[in-house]
Image: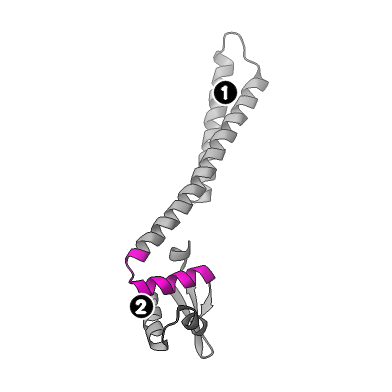
Amino acid sequence: MRILEAVAIVVLILVVEISFGCLLYWVSPHGIDISTIIVSTFMMVGVVGGLTITLFFLFKHYARERTLRVVMLSLNEDEQKVLREILVRKEVRQDDLRRIVDMSKAKLSAIVNNLEKKGMIHKFRYHKTNILRPTKEVSG
């Protein structure tokens, strides 16, 4: 769900509440005050809108966490270690990462190539090393 879809739900609720308020105004035998209907309509839209936006962000966070857990299950221990470090730093030079994770150049290079083939990181050439960034799918 995108934020635009959440806003569309709130607008739809606003339209339904206004329609219900108008119906209540015209059908009411004792004549409910229009200001009462307007205030109650906006209160309901505020409550439901707030719930919709809250659920949207909770769902987005949960989906990201779940995706990351599933991704980690498909990796071996060394790949998980390297990917975690890249995720924490958002962007890291490969030569710096080698010192952080304490791996040989060859081993780290093989892991980085595997992660890139699996679509989990982007690798960009930078002088004699590479810049490593997580993909949008993995980092959220």
In the orientation shown, which residue stands out farthest toward the front?
A: 102
- In the rendered image, residue 49, in percent from the top left (x then y), is placed at 55, 38
- Reading the chain from its start, which is encountered first: label 2 or label 1? 1
**What range is drawn magenta here?**
72-90
Above or below residue 129? Residue 41 is: above
| SS at badge 2 | helix
Asked whether residue 34 is in view, the answer is: yes
Residue at the spot 61% in from the left edge and 25% down from the top edge: 40
Task: Tell me where residue 32 sits by quadrant.
Answer: top right
Our reading of the magenta stretch's main secondary structure is: helix
Residue at the spot 54% in from the left edge and 20% down from the top edge: 23
- In the rendered image, residue 78, in percent from the top left (x then y), is placed at 37, 75
Q: Name the residue under label 1.
A: 21
| SS at badge 1 | helix
Task: Tell me where residue 67 sits by quadrant.
Answer: bottom left
Left/right placement of residue 118 relative to residue 25 reads left
Q: Name the residue under label 2.
A: 114
Q: Nearest the camera: 12 or 94?
A: 94
Please tell me whether residue 136 belongs to the stretch shown in magenta. no
- In the rendered image, residue 69, in percent from the top left (x then y), is placed at 38, 60
- The mark lying in front, picked from 2 and 1, is 2
- In the rendered image, residue 44, in percent from the top left (x then y), is placed at 57, 30
Q: How far is mark 2 from mark 1, CA to CA?
A: 59 Å
